[in-house]
Image (cartoon, helix red, strand yellow):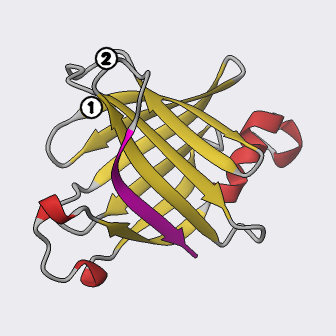
Amino acid sequence: MSTADRSQALAALDVLEGTWTIRPTPPPAWGIADPGSLEGRVRFEWALRGAYLVGRSDAPDPIPDSMLVIAPHEDAYLQHYYDSRGVTRLHRMTLTGGVWTLVRTEADFSPLDFAQRFVGEFSPDASTIDGRWEQSHDGGRTWELDFRLTYRR
């Protein structure tokens, strides 16, 4: 697929392309003695002639390493998620107005013990994403913070 042939939906994902440092801010329940020492990396790159954006992470424990595949779907995106625990999930994704959102409220390849949501806000120069993973135990009506995750170029 040439650059001229790319859809606006695919072009919008360019903001994620490249290598990012990731730093989680774990809750006290995780029992991490030095939370400031947690750092990982994620690299987003185009695959299959630009038809999909693929991300691969090397995350700090206790967060699992992961791989994800993002593709346009209807008027948004789907993110297929796989991790080093053997977990497979499907997130509905949007990327609009400088906000990246992932939501999982239905059982898919894994049981749905709780709903998940990630909300990441891009800095004006797109060099930082301040994000938070949240969970819901009532089907997505109310959300509670699981942990924060910051991406930096």
The part of the image, by quadrant, that contains residue 106 is top left
The one nearer the camera, 47 or 82, is 82
Q: Secondary structure at mark 2?
A: loop
* Circle 2 residue: 108
Residue at figure coordinates x 24%, y 20% from the top left: 112
> Is the C terminus in the top left, top right, bottom left or bottom right quadrant?
bottom right
Q: Are marks 2 and 1 in contact (CB under 8 Å)?
A: yes
Residue extent of the magenta highlight: 144-153
Residue lying furthest right in this view? 4
The one nearer the camera, 113 or 28, is 28
Q: Is residue 93 magenta?
A: no
Q: Secondary structure at mark 1?
A: strand
User: What label does residue 88 carry, if any?
Assistant: 1
Q: Is residue 148 magenta?
A: yes
> Is the N terminus in the top left, top right, bottom left or bottom right quadrant?
top right
- Work out whether mark 2 precedes mark 1 in sequence or the reverse, and give the earlier one: 1
Three-letter amino acid code at disc 1? Thr
Side of 31 relative to 120 (left or right): left
Counting from the top left corner in percent of width and height, residue 54 is at 49, 47
User: What label does residue 122 carry, if any?
Assistant: none
Residue at figure coordinates x 18%, y 65% from the top left: 28
Three-letter amino acid code at disc 2? Asp
Query: Relative to 98, is 90 above or below?
Result: above
Residue at figure coordinates x 44%, y 21% from the top left: 141
CA separation in Å, label 2 and label 1: 8 Å
Q: Main secondary structure of the magenta part?
A: strand
Counting from the top left corner in percent of width and height, residue 94 is at 63, 35
